[in-house]
Image (cartoon, coloured by chain):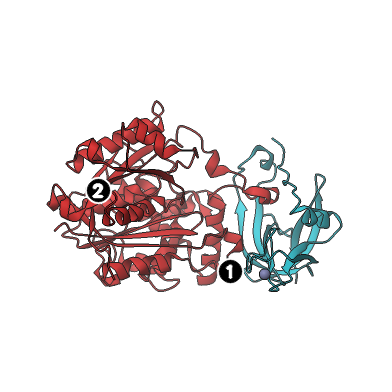
Chain colours: A red, B cyan
Amino acid sequence: MTTLRGKTAITGVGHTAWGKHPDRDRLSLMTEAAAAAIADAGLEKDQIDAVLVKMANSAPSILWGQKVAEALGLQPTIGLSLDQGGAACTGLATYAALAIEAGMIENALILYADTPRTGSRAAMHRPRGDDSVMGWYSVAAGYAMLHRAYQEAHAAPPEDFGIIAVQARAHGAANPHAHLRLPLSMEEYLSGPLLIEPMRRDDCCLVSDGGAAIVLGATARARNPARAVPVLGLGQAQESWEVHLRPDLLRTRAEASGQMAFDMAGIDRGDISFAQLYDCFTVTVLQTLEDYGLAPRGQAGAKARAEGIGLDGWLPLNTSGGLLSESGTPGLQLIIEAVRQLRGEAVLQLPAPRFGLVSNQGGTMHTHATMILGEPQ
Amino acid sequence: MTRPTPEITAINRPYWDGLAEGALRFQRCDGCGHAWLPPRSHCPACLGTQTRWEAASGGGRIVSWVVYHRAYAPHLQDRIPYNVAIVALDEGPRLLTNITDSATGEGFATGAPVALTIEEDDGLHLPRFRLRG
Ligand SMILES: [Zn+2]
């Protein structure tokens, strides 16, 4: 069997400032990020032959991938917009790796931008179909259902969730790129207002404007091999069903997605140097740690508190602040931070990391994608 | 903005008509016996189209619940705090609902038994549940 392990690498990364961009639109943010990523890869624009865009959450749009290619002045071999919720950016990297390995394309640009901070948050607050007659609104509510189910099943104290927010905010406070650079104490977390109980305000990620891009190409053809971060493992798996229709709220198919990525990478859980896990809400991180086999069921929060998730902890987690502190945008910033760590270019740099784990997920934990990255060769 | 109303279709009309008549109905497949909500034209288990409506016994259990402290639409401003719960019917189908005993979820627990109570809310009959001792 052939394997994608190490065949492709992330050769370039770029992003705009995170936060508020009242005078910019999505195409403008995406073009800035794309130009930075292409330059970082050492490529000319016309060497990009795939433009792969994650659909903007706040503005679903027909033929969005083509509009982006037009703004970039490109006529790519493959251009598309994908909707897998927050899993889409790693999903796009997966399909790009397959197309590169198949010889269809050479350099894929994967990008995202949105302006929910200064624009519309209607998508996040939306009525959820006919169930809205019961008061069922917002994206956050589904995660609050998962938070409650986890808390009840495992008798988890609020501090188990709080440690995820407190550590993310500590990392974000040290990151000059971060949208929110305000540290959070456990006391402040616990006394924060309830939003959708049992979730508190600081269980919820930021709402950020911004754009990000990465370039994926064949590892063997990287312009600068010392900065090309090889993609060792890729995985996906999806529940697909809405939270109330799923038979088990205490397990997700992040388990299968993670297993696929670890199998491809051929490494053990203990080999991971750090993880950048999709922290749209704190429960997502606890659940993902357990589904990935990195912590026993019901113990992720207790383990994080006892053994640490900072740079010197058991598992350095979301080292640039994640969605809770660096940027609320859906997923590319986690891949970018993993690339920086493995290049040795991160703000909060770990000493000689070897393997980095990234999760992307969407739709109330019903759509999962996993990426494992290695050291440049 | 007023409260939203369900979009009545040929497929879900028996569900909403049933509530107005005092019954919570779900669908069951003649081919494989699977039972489900929300209404669909095809059985999601075997994709068969021979399906029938059954009235639920009204018994169920709480799977999870949340309490909104924020109003996501203007008409919900007067309602907060309020709960939304996932209830699994004894027959298997699951639905999003409200538990009427306490707006803020006092006394709720996962697995707690509940019983159907259909309430008229602004002309719409809604399937809600109360805790069963
Ligand atoms: Zn069937």
> Does A86 sit left or right of A38 as displayed?
right
In percent of the image, x 54 and y 66: which residue is there?
A249
Point out residue A224 in the picture as x, y percentages from the top left corner: 13, 48
| Front residue (pair A86, A310) | A86
Rounded to the nearest angstrom, the CA distance separating label 2 from label 1 is 42 Å
- What is the chain identity of the residue bearing mark 2? A
Q: Is residue A299 above or below residue A361?
A: below
Whether residue A344 is visible to the viewer of this picture, yes or no, is no
A79 or A347, nearer to the observer: A79
The residue tagged 2 is A106
Q: Viewed as shown, does residue A216 lie left or right of A190?
A: left
Q: Nearer the viewer, mark 2 or mark 1?
A: 2
Query: What's under tag 1, amino acid-wise?
Result: Pro
- Residue A257 point in image, percent of width and height: 40, 65
The answer to whether mark 1 is within 8 Å of ligand 1 is no
Q: Report whether A80 appears left or right of A342.
A: right
Quadrant of the drawing holding the C terminus of chain A:
bottom left
Q: Is residue A141 above or below residue A118?
A: below
Mark 1, residue position = A247
Residue B40 numbered tag: none
The yes-or-no answer for disc 2 within 8 Å of ligand 1 is no
Identify the subunit bearing mark 1: A
At numbered mark 1, what does the secondary structure look like: helix, strand or loop? loop
Compared with A172, A24 (above or below) is: above
Question: Could one spot residue A207 in this view of the protein?
Answer: yes
Which amino acid, by three-letter code, is at mark 2? Answer: Glu
What is the x, y in percent for residue A253? Answer: 46, 66
Ligand number 1: quarter of image: bottom right
